[in-house]
Image: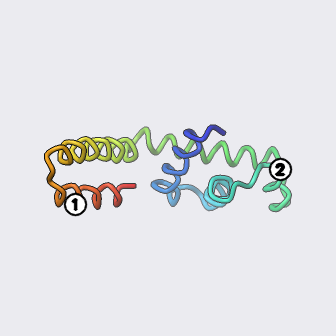
Amino acid sequence: MQIEKHNNLVKLFDIYGKLLSNRQFEVIDKVLNYDIGVSELAELEGESRQSVHDAINKAKKQLYSFEEKCKILEKLETINNELNIIKSKLKNDDTKELSHQIDAIIDKLN
C-alpha cells in the first residue's frame, strides 16, 4: 500500500473507525495500526484469506463512503493548510506569540 494512501486510511480510520461494524473495526485496525498482512491475519483469526481480504475491502470502502458524505477529513486538512499559511505570514511579520497560538491549533488538528 502506498504510504500516502495508507496515511489517508489511518486518518479516515481515526475519524470514522467507531462507525464500522465490530468485525470491520478489528480487521482494519490490525492492518493499519499493527501492520498485519492478510495471510497473517487470516491465520490469527482462523479464517480464509478471502474472508479477511473481503472484510478489509469492505471496511476501506465504508471509510471512504463516510468521508464522501461527511467530508470531515477534507475540512480538517483545509483548516490545517489555511493555518499553516497564516503561520507563515505571521512569522514574516515577527509576531511570535500568534505563531505559537496557531501552532497549538495545528497540533490539535493533527
Tell me which corner region of the image, top left, top right, bottom left or bottom right, holds residue 69. top left
Q: Quadrant of the C terminus?
A: bottom left
Secondary structure, mark 1, is: helix
Left/right of residue 94 with respect to residue 67 in the rendered view: left
Q: Count residues near mark 1 (Cα–Cα under 10 Å), then give few for <14, some for 14-19, many for 20+.
A: few
Q: Amino acid at mark 2?
A: Ser
Give the image location of residue 34, x and y in percent: 68, 59
Tell me which corner region of the image, top left, top right, bottom left or bottom right, holds residue 22. bottom right
Which residue is under mark 2? 39
Give the image location of residue 33, x and y in percent: 62, 58
Secondary structure, mark 2, is: helix
Q: Amino acid at mark 1?
A: Gln
Q: How many marks?
A: 2
Q: Quadrant of the N terminus?
A: top right
Q: Nearer the viewer, residue 64 or 9?
A: 9
Task: Identify the residue at image location x=24%, y=60%.
Answer: 100
Which residue is under mark 1? 101
First along the sequence among labels 1 and 2? 2
